[in-house]
Amino acid sequence: MRFNLYKIRLKIRKNKELFLLITLFLISLIITQIYNFNKQQTNKNYINLINNIYFQKNLKHILDNLEPRYEIIEHTIKKGDTFDKILNRYLVPEDEINKIKKSFKKDGNINRLKTGQILNFTIDKLDNTKIVNFSLPISRSEKIQLTRNFALDDFKKTKIITNLTKKIIFQEGVILQSLYKTAVDLKIKPNIIIDFARIYGFQIDFQRDIRKNDSFQIIYEVFVDDKGKVIETGEIIFADLKLKGQSNALYYFNKKNYSDHYDGNGRSIKKALMKTPINGARLSSSYGLRKHPIDGYTKMHRGTDFAAPLGTPIMASGNGVIIRAQWCGGGGNCVKIKHNSSYSTIYAHMSKFAKGIKNGVRVKQGQIIGYVGSTGKSTGPHLHYEVILNGKKINSQTLKLPSGKILKGKNRKLFEVQKIKIDVMKSELILNLN
């Protein structure tokens, strides 16, 4: 026995490293087996817990309580939306829809919704998708609020009027690319930009007359709610479009039958027709002989073409009555306006007509009548514009048009006072800005 032990020890000493390696391997194997056994037991316990019916009920209860009971919805009206369609989309039951409609019965046709208008309402998802409250705007500063009376299961109706505060805004900018882009970069409201273009459209061609580094100043009104959000825009009180360093200042004079923008001498900037009935366009083809881009032969071009992006608004160049708003063959969608016994204008290749534009409708100078398109015989988006004088098509760009009214007597004195006040206001606004 002693001999055997001695021999074993001797072998161990000679193969010490091999023996140590075998020992470590055996220890690792044992530990792994123990770990795997414990893991299997843990997994088994977890599975038993998950499959436990009481655990499942408690988990469902917790998850149900995590989901909010009330859903607040802000829906923006899209083209083709009706009141019923909108509420059906949010799974509101038919009897609820009828209750809401009945509450609004005295406030006109509820399905007469405007695109872009926002409906706000809250629904109770745990109580048969009931409406808790509903808000319908009826104007920019007024809305009707319905609040559910749970005891009577009907609605309390409240008219909410938002008090608007008038603010005067001053902006000035240097034109590097286009007037429109500079104005947008200054966050001037689109309505004001369009109005600014309309005012100067009588005397300035926005494509040919404006150059890089020309500048402008503008003072205009906005009306804000109690949160400072602009709800609507007002008048342009002052404007100055400086071309090649030359001022073209205009002042707003607000008096019955004389409300208009006037130059420093009290002369209205309005003329019989606007020089350019579109903002930000490029003169792409002048009046005169040219090779027709589609027909391929030289013929007289009896109008002026303005290239502009698809959908650019087109304005009526003067007051008048629409005598045509339809498909005009090669002219595509076109509008013809009779301004007086002498003048008519034609606007062709429109993508679509503006809302309400049809035969017999009276329009005002600067009113949007349609949008730039490429309908009919056209190679790209543009406006084909014609001026007709006593039945003859003439060059709109060389037409000399009579100026508008000139202030005289008492009105001229009132205007001079108003002009001084506006100049003082402008100085104060510039000081505050700096």
Image: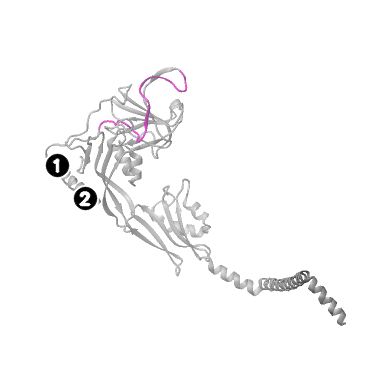
At horizontal 71% and vertical 74% (from top left) the residue drawn is 38
Q: Nearer the viewer, mark 2 or mark 1?
A: 2
In the rendering, which numbered label is found on residue 432? Answer: none
Magenta stretch, main secondary structure, is loop
At horizontal 25% and vertical 41% (from top left) the residue drawn is 239
Of the 4 image quadrants, the one containing the N terminus is bottom right
Q: Position of residue 127 (x, y in %)?
A: 52, 66
Up/down of 3 relative to 136, above or below: below
Q: Magenta includes 283? A: yes
What is the spatial separation of the Cα atoms under label 2 and label 1, in whole angstroms? 23 Å
Up/down of 140 relative to 415, above or below: below
Colouring mode (rainbow / by chain / secondary structure / one colour)? one colour
Question: In the visual, does 276 lie left or right of 132?
Answer: left
Q: Position of residue 204 (x, y in %)?
A: 28, 32
Q: Position of residue 406 (x, y in %)?
A: 17, 34
Three-letter residue code for mark 2: Leu
Q: Magenta includes 289? A: yes
Three-letter residue code for mark 1: Glu
Depth check: 228 or 89 in front? Answer: 228
In the rendering, which numbered label is found on residue 416? Answer: 1
Q: Position of residue 290 (x, y in %)?
A: 40, 19
Q: Magenta segment, which residues?
A: 271-296
The picture quadrant where one finds residue 404 is top left
Question: In the visual, does 255 lie left or right of 7?
Answer: left
Q: Which element type, helix, strand or loop, lies under badge 1?
A: helix
Depth check: 1 or 421 in front? Answer: 1
- Residue placed under numbered mark 2 in the picture: 431
Depth check: 86 or 173 in front? Answer: 173
Mark with earlier residue (2, 1): 1
Alpha-carbon neighbours of circle 1 within 10 Å: few (<14), some, or many (≥20)?
some
Question: In the visual, does 12 lie left or right of 373?
Answer: right
How many numbered badges does the structure rendering display? Answer: 2
